[in-house]
């Protein structure tokens, strides 16, 4: 009986592998769907010995582990690697937990400090055979271990001998989807929402399993399904059943579901007259709602809340404060071990106000007042996901509050899914930033991972760039940002170079020359985008509303702080927002060492110059050039980079599969057009103030300023 079972599993594995191969070569010929989980055969000289897979357990997660290892190893080694009952050959992979697998239990691996998600991968001896043990305390840990092992294979890392032990540094590694219930995605550039609300719960798109696989392969363990500009309907009984169906698909992959909650839902859904958080009926409504949700989704993560921001309702609507609101919701989910993620993206506008100071002013006074199951989610910079921002002063500024960074993976301000911009270097800059909160070395990473202030609950969120496009992200290279976010959430110390290298090898090719070119392009790309969009500290000069392309001249928005002119303040003297003592003084929100460095024009990093200073056009920079010339040369440098990148990419034709090569080439052509447009429009406009000629080396604008003003760039 047992033997027949084993034979069946073996036959299933063979069939599965055959199917995967045929899908890979026929239907799915390199359209990007398989992301970094392509498992294409390694070069024949680079295939290690793997004989079989011994995988214990029958749970959906154990099955996921088995399926992934079979598909991955078979694909990479170019032959079927099947499931075996016992260890009979050298090079057998043994995977499981001490509970599910007597073999793993017998190895007595050091798992005690690895928690619920960590894993060990180790070369060992069993039955006199050399094996690779992938072991964890939980099956999800084993799944993470399996994906890590496959990553090593894909990157052609040596796998004999192995002695790896890992656990995630942050607890909540989360995507935030800004998906609306009608299928549209706010700031989404890769098609429609992946959640087919109208078909759920009866029909669940099989693609959701691949979404969960991709996330689990990186260690992402949570996802908020709906837009922070939330519709109360997502909390009604009908939608909760739909969400439960999604949660069921994600569960085996270790992913918990969160929902964005509209603060006024008790009125919209419950018919109450108020949503005042101190009103007993309101609190009772939320408690009952939480009970209802947890009855359907026992491992529901909790609520993500955008309150009193950009017109959303919140406690302040009822003359209460952020703590009243967050803690009331926290009490509702606390009995179920739920979490409330309260967003700090709050920037009420008063006259003469500096928006960069707003979140700190609004939230910092509440330090130490939030409940134990509340996380305050703070964007990386003080304004809004600009191509370059200094770190947000709330990091380090709220020692008694559990903070969690919010990054934006979707490229709202970075050329949508048209521009190649690898964001790992930007996130590294943020994570490495030294807040000096407890002296030198108080980096954002140490605040996020809880080590600086002993923060119990930790996390990081990324606003997702996924959609229904076949390649998930619109631009093949935008997949790298999803990848890098997930990997950094697991280990915020990973270098951009390692991330680029891993991703290129798994996603495109192991060809050494191509790997070198592609990693270089990735690593240079973000700075190039900054150069042609917002060099030297410029920010928020995008066309209002859609944020694609430049409109530094724009001053017609209802709110002053939605206007580019508010941010750059160009005049005949110079350019930039004075945030020092002579201006808004919001620089004083940073700790003294940082404040003093930013506040002095001589020590301020040049890449943030006009973020903090109104810089005279003829101010001399380190290069010896005056500010105006340097600005113009940065714009030109950005354009030049895209041109070279196109040539580099063209030279890879034949090395990269035709489908993806052509798709990326088309995107790069758009990027070049856009970069030149950015340069010309911005320089022509700023020139009306600087009244200086373009320095040599900067090309003549292609159109007149009026033409640029008349029509926005189209995407
Ligand atoms: C801005 C977006 C807007 C979001 C908002 C937010 O333009 O669509 O709703 O952030 O984060 O970046 O709430």
Image: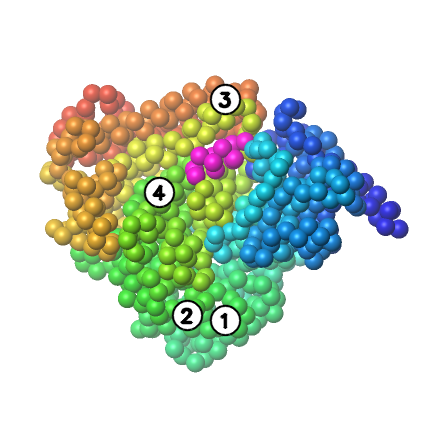
Q: Position of residue 700 (x, y in %)?
A: 24, 22
Question: Which residue was labeled with disc 4?
Answer: 429
Which residue is at the front of the view, 200 or 56? 56
In this rendering, is residue 676 above or below 334?
A: above
The dominant secondary structure in magenta is helix
What residue is drawn where x is 82% and y is 46%? 6
- 447 is within the stretch colored magenta: no
What residue is drawn where x is 26% and y is 30%? 634
Q: Is residue 267 left or right of residue 135?
A: left
Question: Which residue was labeled with disc 2?
Answer: 371
Question: Which residue was labeled with disc 1?
Answer: 334
Mark 2 and ligand 1: say if the CB distance to the nearest ligand atom is below 8 Å: no
Secondary structure category for the residue under label 3: helix
Q: Is residue 338 left or right of residue 59?
A: left
Callout 1 touching callout 4 (CB < 8 Å): no
Distance Cα–Cα, label 4 vs label 3 = 27 Å
First reached walking from the N terminus: tag 1 or tag 2: 1
Residue 113 appears in which quarter of the rendering?
A: bottom right
In this rendering, is residue 339 above or below 199?
A: below
Q: Residues within 10 Å of mark 1 (few under 14, many from 20)?
A: some
Highlighted range, magenta: 495-505
Name, please, the residue furthest toward the bottom: 280
Question: Which residue was labeled with disc 3?
Answer: 513
In this rendering, is residue 311 above or below 127?
A: below
Secondary structure category for the residue under label 4: helix
Q: Residues within 10 Å of mark 2 (few under 14, many from 20)?
A: many
Which residue is at the front of the view, 230 or 655? 655
Callout 1 touching callout 2 (CB < 8 Å): yes
Residue 138 appears in which quarter of the rendering?
A: bottom right
Q: Residues within 10 Å of mark 3 (few under 14, many from 20)?
A: few
Secondary structure category for the residue under label 2: loop
Q: Quadrant of the C terminus?
A: top left
């Amino acid at each position: 009986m047992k033997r027949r079972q084993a034979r069946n599993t073996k036959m299933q594995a063979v069939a599965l592998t055959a199917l995967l191969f045929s899908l890979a070569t026929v239907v799915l010929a390199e359209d990007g769907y398989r992301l970094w989980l392509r498992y294409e055969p390694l070069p024949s000289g680079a295939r290690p010995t793997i004989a079989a897979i011994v995988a214990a357990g029958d749970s959906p997660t154990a099955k996921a582990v088995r399926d992934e290892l079979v598909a991955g190893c078979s694909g990479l080694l170019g032959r079927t690697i099947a499931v075996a009952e016992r260890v009979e050959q050298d090079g057998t992979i043994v995977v499981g937990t001490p509970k599910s697998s007597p073999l793993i239990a017998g190895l007595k691996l050091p798992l005690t400090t690895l928690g619920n998600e960590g894993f060990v991968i180790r070369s060992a001896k069993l039955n006199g055979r050399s094996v690779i043990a992938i072991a964890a305390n939980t099956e999800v840990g084993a799944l993470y271990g399996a994906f890590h092992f496959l990553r090593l294979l894909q990157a052609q890392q040596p796998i004999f001998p192995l002695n790896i032990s890992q656990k995630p540094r942050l607890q909540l590694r989360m995507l935030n989807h800004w998906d609306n219930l009608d299928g549209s995605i706010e700031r989404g550039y890769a098609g429609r929402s992946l959640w087919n609300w109208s078909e759920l719960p009866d029909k669940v798109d099989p693609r959701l399993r691949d979404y969960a696989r991709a996330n689990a392969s990186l260690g992402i363990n949570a996802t908020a399904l709906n837009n922070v500009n939330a519709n109360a309907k997502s909390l009604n009984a009908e939608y909760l059943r739909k969400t439960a169906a999604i949660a069921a698909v994600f569960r085996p992959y270790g992913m918990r579901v969160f929902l964005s909650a509209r603060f006024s839902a008790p009125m919209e859904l419950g018919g109450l007259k108020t949503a005042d958080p101190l009103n007993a009926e309101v609190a009772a409504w939320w408690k009952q709602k939480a009970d209802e949700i947890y009855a359907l989704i026992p491992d529901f993560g909790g609520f993500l809340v955008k309150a009193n921001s950009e017109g959303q309702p919140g406690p302040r609507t009822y003359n209460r404060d952020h703590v009243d609101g967050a803690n009331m919701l926290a009490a509702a989910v606390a009995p179920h071990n739920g979490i409330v993620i309260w967003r700090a993206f709050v920037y009420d506008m008063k006259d003469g106000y500096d928006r960069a100071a707003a979140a700190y002013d609004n939230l910092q006074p509440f330090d130490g007042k939030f409940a134990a199951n509340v996380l305050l989610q703070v964007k990386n910079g003080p304004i809004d996901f600009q191509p370059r921002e200094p770190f947000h002063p709330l990091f380090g500024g709220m020692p008694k509050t559990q903070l969690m960074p919010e990054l934006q993976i979707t490229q709202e301000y970075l050329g949508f899914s048209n521009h190649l911009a690898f964001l790992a270097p930007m996130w590294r800059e943020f994570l490495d930033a030294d807040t000096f909160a407890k002296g030198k070395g108080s980096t954002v990473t140490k605040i996020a991972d809880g080590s600086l202030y002993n923060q119990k609950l930790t996390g990081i969120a990324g606003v997702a760039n996924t959609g229904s496009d076949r390649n998930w992200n619109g631009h093949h290279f935008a997949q790298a940002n999803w990848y890098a976010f997930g990997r950094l959430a697991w280990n915020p110390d990973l270098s951009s170079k390692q991330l680029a290298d891993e991703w290129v090898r798994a996603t495109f090719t192991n060809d050494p020359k191509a790997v070198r070119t592609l990693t270089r392009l990735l690593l240079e790309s973000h700075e190039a985008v900054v150069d042609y969009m917002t060099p030297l500290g410029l920010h928020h000069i995008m066309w209002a509303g859609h944020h694609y392309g430049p409109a530094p001249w724009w001053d017609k928005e209802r709110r002053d702080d939605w206007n580019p002119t508010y941010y750059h303040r160009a005049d005949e003297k110079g350019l930039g927002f004075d945030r020092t003592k002579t201006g808004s003084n919001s620089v004083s929100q940073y700790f003294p060492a940082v404040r003093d460095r930013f506040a002095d024009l001589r020590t301020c990093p040049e890449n943030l110059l006009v973020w903090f200073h109104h810089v005279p056009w003829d101010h001399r920079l380190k290069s010896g050039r005056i500010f105006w010339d340097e600005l113009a040369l940065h714009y030109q440098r950005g354009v030049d980079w895209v041109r070279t990148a196109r040539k580099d990419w063209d030279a890879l034709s034949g090395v990269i599969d035709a489908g993806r090569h052509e798709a990326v080439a088309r995107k790069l052509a758009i990027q070049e057009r856009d970069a030149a447009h950015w340069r010309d429009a911005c320089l022509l406009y700023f020139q009306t103030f600087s009244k200086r000629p373009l320095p040599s080396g900067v090309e003549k604008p292609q159109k007149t300023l009026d033409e640029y003003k008349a029509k926005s760039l189209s995407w």
